[in-house]
Amino acid sequence: MIRITPALHIDESEISESFVRASGPGGQNVNKVSTAVELRFDAQASLNLPEGVKARLKTVAGRRMTKDGVVVLLAQRFRTQEANRMDALARLVDMIAQAAVVQAVRRTTKPTRASQRRRVDDKVQRGAVKRKRTERPEAE
């Protein structure tokens, strides 16, 4: 079991990894060794994720989630397969942990009467300052 939050876990069997050749510099091994990791996690079929987390994960994952609800991550930042595996898994855990947080609902409130009064008083005062700039002293 992979721990996401204290109350949320996913099973390791729900994650599949395949290894592909990484793009970019790699020295002598660039055309021989498959170091990049393509991690797949079927979020829709996961029994351990609540429906709310699945819905928020769709937003967090964005285009990294397929229409079928599979999260696909490609990790090729490092030169070793093991480091790329850990990177992909860490990114998946972070993504699910971010989706597990429920955003507080924003309730609209009315400004208080005192704050409305302060706002109008400030506007009147600022207008008076601007009016004084255009006033000319009378000719003597």
Image (cartoon, rainbow, N blue to C red):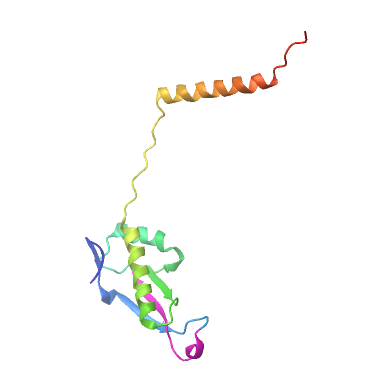
Residue at the spot 30% in from the left edge and 69% down from the top edge: 45
Residue 16 placement: quadrant: bottom left
The outermost residue toward the right is 139
The outermost residue toward the top is 140
Above or below: residue 117 compared with residue 35: above
The total of numbered circles placed on residues is: 0
Q: Position of residue 127 (x, y in %)?
A: 60, 22
Camera-side residue of 120 and 137 = 137
Residue 11 placement: quadrant: bottom left
| Region of the chain picked out in magenta, as a range | 26-42
Q: Position of residue 78 (x, y in %)?
A: 43, 78
Q: Position of residue 61 (x, y in %)?
A: 41, 64
Residue at the spot 40% in from the left edge and 60% down from the top edge: 60
Q: Is-magenta flag for residue 29?
A: yes
Above or below: residue 133 compared with residue 67: above
Q: Is-magenta flag for residue 33?
A: yes
Quarter of the rendering occupied by the N terminus: bottom left
Residue at the spot 43% in from the left edge and 68% down from the top edge: 64
Left or right of residue 29: residue 58: left
Camera-side residue of 113 and 133 = 133
Camera-side residue of 34 and 50 = 34
